[in-house]
Amino acid sequence: MRSLNVLQKKKAEQRKIIALTAYDFHTADWLSECPLDFILVGDSVANVIAGHSSTLPVTMEEMLYHTRMTVRGARDIPVIADMPFLSYEIDPLEAVRNAGRFIKDAGAAAVKVEGGSQIIPAVRKMIAAHIPVLGHVGLTPQSILQFGGYIVQGKTAESAEKIKAEALALQEAGVFGIVLECIPRSLAASITGLLAIPTIGIGAGPDCDGQILVIHDLLGWDPHPKKFVKPYAAFRADAQAAVQAFAADVSAGRFPDDDHSF
């Protein structure tokens, strides 16, 4: 497996970090042939695979299941696992036990957690147990009930300073990088300049040290993409066209033909 140390090297050399989510063997398998620095098994699996309206319902067992199959497909690309809601916030010792399952049982190279000062004890405990941790500030989807929805964060001076403070606290606690989600470009640029560790943006503008997207968003599964998403394919439309063609061939007796029969 390639080392996550390449992220720090890329920041130093001003080369962009590239990452995507994946949740299954076959997606990770073909992504392993692409120029990615890591794959994230995001708790966004709750939205794009399970059909929930938020990430909150996904469980440890579900995240472990998806991490295991993704690791099998990823070959030498490091896989980072999202720790789900309430798996690390309550008790630092419980956080270590849960994070350890992602590393020891599922084969992840690191875990990701959301939040700032309130999770620092858990972050320190996990890192003391030799578990690499990726931070995540800004719009943290596990806090959606507090935020009142998926709303851009850091738009006021007060909230911007809070996010900066959270990022600095996470760096001091020992995380190897921080995801910046849905914050103004200027704030993301400021945080990226302040930190010695890499920042990976999603909806945070081009000035972060790297970028990550949900694979389903990149491929165009959603007919109504988010503002910060650039679909690079039209999978939904192409897949529907393929099904329509299949249905037409079956209805007309064109499939299966001699070439596709024994």
Image (cartoon, rainbow, N blue to C red):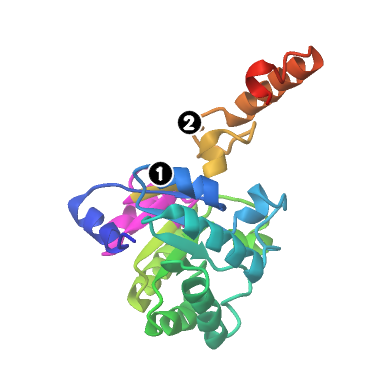
Q: Residue furthest left?
A: 13
Q: Residue furthest bottom?
A: 93
Nearer-N-terminus badge (1/2):
1
**Image quadrant in which the N terminus is located:** bottom left
Q: 194 or 84: which is nearer to us?
A: 84
Q: Residues within 10 Å of mark 1 (few under 14, many from 20)?
A: many
Locate residue 15, reporting x and y percent. Answer: 24, 47
Residue 257 visible in the picture: yes
In the rendered view, does 197 fall on the left or right side of 113? left
Q: Residues within 10 Å of mark 2 (few under 14, many from 20)?
A: few
Q: Secondary structure at mark 2?
A: loop
- Above or below residue 244? Residue 176 is below
Q: Residue furthest right?
A: 251
**Magenta region, residue range:** 180-209
Find out whether the residues at labels 1 and 2 contact each other: C-beta distance under 8 Å.
no
- Above or below residue 56? Residue 105 is below
- Residue ID at (40%, 44%): 205
Q: Which residue position holds label 1?
A: 205
Q: Which residue position holds label 2?
A: 232
**Image quadrant in which the C terminus is located:** top right
Of circles 1 and 2, which is in front? 2
Q: In the image, is residue 157 part of the stretch drawn in magenta?
A: no
Residue 203 visible in the picture: no
Locate residue 10, reporting x and y percent. Answer: 24, 54
* Residue 255: numbered disc: none
- Residue ID at (60%, 54%): 44
Label 1 to label 2, Cα distance in Å? 17 Å
Q: Amino acid at mark 1?
A: Gly
Q: 52 or 161: which is nearer to us?
A: 52
Q: Secondary structure at mark 1?
A: loop
